[in-house]
Each structure stands twice: as structure tokens, then as C-alpha cells.
Image (cartoon, helix red, strand yellow):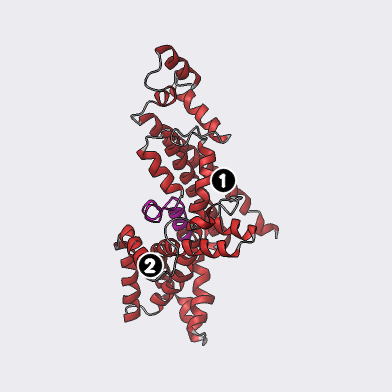
């Protein structure tokens, strides 16, 4: 046991250190974006009609009269304490806004990536097994459409067909108005809050609103995951251990699932993690089409209202998601793949 655990600790520490450096870089980039923005944060606080004395007092209180390096240190210190500033469009702390809006994106992205993995990995395996046959060509066409079709167009068509015409799913928003104020926002996750409240009708209503945008995101993640799965499996299927397994009489399913899949698990997890991070970034067009109050819609509205603090807070949260998921996938790949440890 000690021989297996010993090499893991230094690698975990190294990846943790790299994640810390990456997070500092994300903080630096967001800080520089805020400085480069053609918006005076002091005027946003005191207003255009403030006296020069009030302007200077607010500028000193905000620390904007200090050197850039000192301002960056203060920015990092405030961010570490959860102080991301105050949104000028909502009048609330940015962290409070993110706690309200991010769970909607988390719920949508999680179901989307679950659907993408459930269908993308098996379809990629099937395409690799049927290499250059009609099934492979068909699955590649499905993946190509996932990259090519504009997401806003597909979302509008989905609403027209499945909501307006067939009535199979809920419309824009997370809940119908009749349920909107009957469920306490304990976690800001509709499915969790409705289950916690024991309201089965509200749960079904929230699920009906969630299915269509989640399926849309799942389709786009499926296109990428299936393509990468196909590439990973094609690379492995020509190796000697696969031929040996077939000679010994192993079935094709046994070869794919029992022999090849464990060998591609590490890079496949990295692909899935990055796909999940992209969905957590906030599918802006999807959230806009479906009026989904997530982080993407929040940052978009903040951009239109020149709310720098909200934009930087959302950008920082997205960067944190990428760093955490990328680090987790690296550690998982290190633990699962002996070739990485060697």
C-alpha cells in the first residue's frame, strides 16, 4: 500500500501548486481587464454630478490612488475573502448574485454533461468499432451537425416544435408562474428545492423546463465527446493487446469495455471535464433563448449595463471552474494510468 500511495502525494502537491499559480493568473487577467475597461468605477459609485472632493474621497476609499501592484494585492485579498465588489445593476454584492445565478447554470450543465456522456461515449465506441462503415459515417455526420448548427436556431426550433406545437416540455424559464413563488430557494437548484419541499408537481414542472435546454447542451457536448472517444478507441484497437484478446476468444464487447476502455479512461475523463467546464462557463445563447437565469445571462446583462464588478466576478468564477476541473482530471488520470506515474 505504501508503495502505491507514496508517489501520489508529491504529484498531488505539484498539481495543487500549479492550480494555485493558474488561479493567480486568472486573478491577474481579470484585474487587468477591469483596469483596461473604459469605465470609471468611481463615477459608478458617486455619480456624474459628484463634487471633485467627493470623487477624490471615494477614489481614496476604493484604493484607486495607490500603485497598481498594491491594488492587485488588495484585489487578491478581497477575492480570497469572497469580496468581489458590488454590482451596480442589482445593487447587491457580486458574490450574492453569483450564489443566486450560478446554481441555475450548474443544474443545466450537469444534466447536459450527463446526457452527453451517456450517449457520446457509447456512440464513439460504436463508431470506432464500425470504422469506415455506414454506421461510422452516420455517427460522424451527427457529430458534425452538433458543431455546425447554430445553437440559438436549434433552441428556437426546439421551443417551436416541442413546447409550442407538441407541448411535451416546459417553455422558457425554470418554473411556470403558478409554481414560481411556492418553493423556497434553499439551494437555488429547482429540482433539489422542489424535492426538499415535497412538491411533486413543481418537481415535474421544473424537470419539463430543464429537459429541452439540457438536451440541447447535451447534444453539443455529445458531438465533441463522441468524436474524441472514437479517436481514442481507434488508436487503441490496432495495438497488440487487442489482437491478443481477440485471439483468446474475447467477444467484441469484452474487448471494447474490458480492455480498451480502461486504457483510454484517463484522456477521456479530461475531455469530459473540459466539456463540463465549457458548459459551466454559461451557454450564453442557450440561456438567452430559454430565459434561463444562469451565469451566462447574468454576465451578458452586466456587459450591456457596463457593470464591471459583475463581469469580473462572473469571469473569475468561470476561471475557477476551469482550474478545478482541469486539476481534478489531471489527478484522476495520474491515479488511473500507470503510464503517467512512470
Answer above or below: position of 115 versus 107: below
Q: Which residue is mark 1?
A: 16
Q: Residues within 10 Å of mark 1 (few under 14, many from 20)?
A: some
Q: Is residue 332 magenta?
A: no
| Residue 222: image location, x then y, percent | 41, 66
Hey, which residue is sitting farthest bottom in the picture? 249
Q: Nearer the viewer, residue 138 or 41?
A: 41
Q: Is residue 279 magenta?
A: yes
Q: Nearer the viewer, residue 9 or 26?
A: 26
- Position of the C terminus, as image quadrant, is bottom right
Q: Can residue 107 be seen at all in this image of the molecule?
A: yes
Q: Residues within 10 Å of mark 2 (few under 14, many from 20)?
A: many
Going from the N terminus, do you reach mark 2 or mark 1 first?
Answer: 1
Q: Which mark is residue 154?
A: none
| Residue 238: image location, x then y, percent | 41, 75
Q: Which residue is mark 2?
A: 227
Amino acid at each position: 500500500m505504501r508503495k502505491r500511495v507514496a508517489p501520489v502525494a508529491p504529484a498531488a502537491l505539484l498539481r495543487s501548486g500549479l492550480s494555485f499559480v493558474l488561479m493567480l493568473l486568472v486573478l491577474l487577467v481579470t484585474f487587468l481587464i477591469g483596469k483596461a475597461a473604459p469605465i470609471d468605477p468611481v463615477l459608478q459609485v458617486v455619480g456624474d454630478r459628484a463634487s471633485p472632493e467627493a470623487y477624490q474621497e471615494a477614489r481614496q476609499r476604493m484604493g484607486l490612488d495607490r500603485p497598481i501592484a498594491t491594488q492587485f494585492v488588495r484585489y487578491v485579498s478581497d477575492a480570497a475573502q469572497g469580496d468581489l465588489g458590488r454590482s451596480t445593476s442589482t445593487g447587491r454584492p457580486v458574490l450574492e448574485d453569483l450564489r443566486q445565478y450560478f446554481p441555475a447554470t450548474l443544474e443545466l450543465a450537469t444534466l447536459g454533461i450527463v446526457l452527453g456522456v451517456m450517449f457520446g461515449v457509447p456512440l464513439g465506441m460504436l463508431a470506432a468499432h464500425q470504422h469506415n462503415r455506414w454506421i461510422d459515417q452516420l455517427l460522424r455526420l451527427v457529430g458534425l451537425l452538433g458543431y455546425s448548427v447554430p445553437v440559438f436556431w436549434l433552441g428556437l426550433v426546439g421551443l417551436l416544435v416541442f413546447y409550442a406545437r407538441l407541448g411535451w416540455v416546459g417553455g422558457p424559464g425554470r418554473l411556470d408562474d403558478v409554481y414560481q413563488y411556492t418553493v423556497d430557494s434553499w439551494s437555488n437548484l429547482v429540482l433539489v428545492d422542489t424535492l426538499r419541499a415535497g412538491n411533486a408537481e413543481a418537481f415535474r414542472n421544473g424537470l419539463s423546463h430543464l429537459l429541452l435546454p439540457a438536451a440541447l447542451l447535451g447534444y453539443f457536448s455529445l458531438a465533441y465527446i463522441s468524436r474524441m472517444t472514437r479517436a481514442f478507441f481507434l488508436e487503441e484497437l490496432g495495438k497488440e493487446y487487442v489482437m491478443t484478446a481477440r485471439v483468446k476468444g474475447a467477444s467484441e464487447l469484452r474487448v471494447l469495455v474490458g480492455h480498451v476502455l480502461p486504457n483510454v479512461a484517463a484522456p477521456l475523463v479530461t475531455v469530459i471535464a473540459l466539456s463540463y467546464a465549457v458548459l459551466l462557463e454559461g451557454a450564453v445563447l442557450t440561456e438567452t433563448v430559454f430565459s434561463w437565469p444562469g451565469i451566462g445571462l447574468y454576465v451578458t446583462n452586466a456587459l450591456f449595463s457596463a457593470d464591471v464588478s459583475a463581469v469580473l466576478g462572473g469571469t473569475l468564477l468561470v476561471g475557477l471552474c476551469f482550474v478545478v476541473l482541469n486539476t481534478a482530471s489531471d489527478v484522476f488520470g495520474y491515479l488511473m494510468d500507470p503510464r503517467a506515474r512512470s
